[in-house]
Amino acid sequence: MDALDALLNRVSVPRLVDPAPDAAQRELLFRAALRAPDHGQLRPWRFLTVEGDARTRMGELFAEALRVADVEVADEALTKARGMPLRAPLLVVVIARTQAHPKVPELEQVIAAGCAAHGILLAAHAQGIGAVWRTGDMAYNAHVAKGLGLAAGEQIIAYLYLGTPERELRRAPELAVDDFVSAWNG
């Protein structure tokens, strides 16, 4: 698949099954991530892979986070939280690692980590791997961040769910470029 095809036709694939990407495919996913724009060559990202039984442990971490926030949380919410990481055979947690820098503001570093996540999504699509970017409350939860070992200056940008598409991919919607682009004439 050429680069323009991947850029123009990538879609989120929420229904994922085994197998997960193999070692060679993962190598390409992460090599693509490392090509993200990176002003100052700060490498403001890191990645955690979560698979197998670790997905169950992550689900328990999510349930604990709900209990910390509300000791009377409903059983249905706990069950849902436990099941979230089980929706794909592989999760990649994309983490922005920001640092003080005189020329590269924190926001730019976070955006660079987001670009790294997008690189993974594009590389997945190019290889026929299904992928979807998810966030939600568990991406912004301090208990989850601590449980995943995030340090000061780190934040979760994305949970990328990866696997084999359960069904045929939907077609990317056609958007009118003119709806989003205008000239500024001063």
Image (cartoon, grey):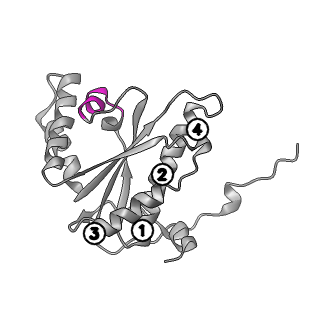
User: Which is nearer the N-term, disc 3 or disc 1?
Assistant: 1
| Image coords of residue 91 (percent x, y) | 28, 53
Which secondary structure, mark 1? Answer: helix
Counting every numbered tag in the picture gives 4
Q: Position of residue 119 (x, y in %)?
A: 48, 58
In the image, the segment drawn in magenta is 140-147
Viewer-side label of 3, 2: 2
Residue that badge 3 annotates: 164
Label 4 Cα crowd, 10 Å radius (few <14 / some 14-19 / many 20+): some
Mark 2 neighbour density, 10 Å: few (under 14) some (14–19) many (20 or more) = many
CA gap, disc 1 and disc 2: 14 Å
Secondary element type, mark 4: helix
Three-letter amino acid code at the position of disc 3 = Thr
Farthest-out residue, right: 186
> In the rendered structure, are the residues bearing label 1 and label 2 in contact, judged by CB atoms less than 8 Å apart?
no
Residue position marked by numbered label 1 in the rendering: 125
Confirm whether the magenta stretch covers residue 52.
no
- Label pair 4/3, CB-CB below 8 angstroms: no
Q: Residue reaching furthest front?
A: 41
What residue sits right under mark 4 in the picture? 108
The residue drawn where x is 32% and y is 51% is 92
Residue at which label 2 appears? 116
Answer whether labels 4 and 1 touch (C-beta < 8 Å): no
Q: Which of the two marks, 4 or 3, is nearer to us in this view? A: 4
In the rendered image, residue 163, in percent from the top left (x then y), is placed at 28, 64
Residue for point 41% across, 32% down: 154
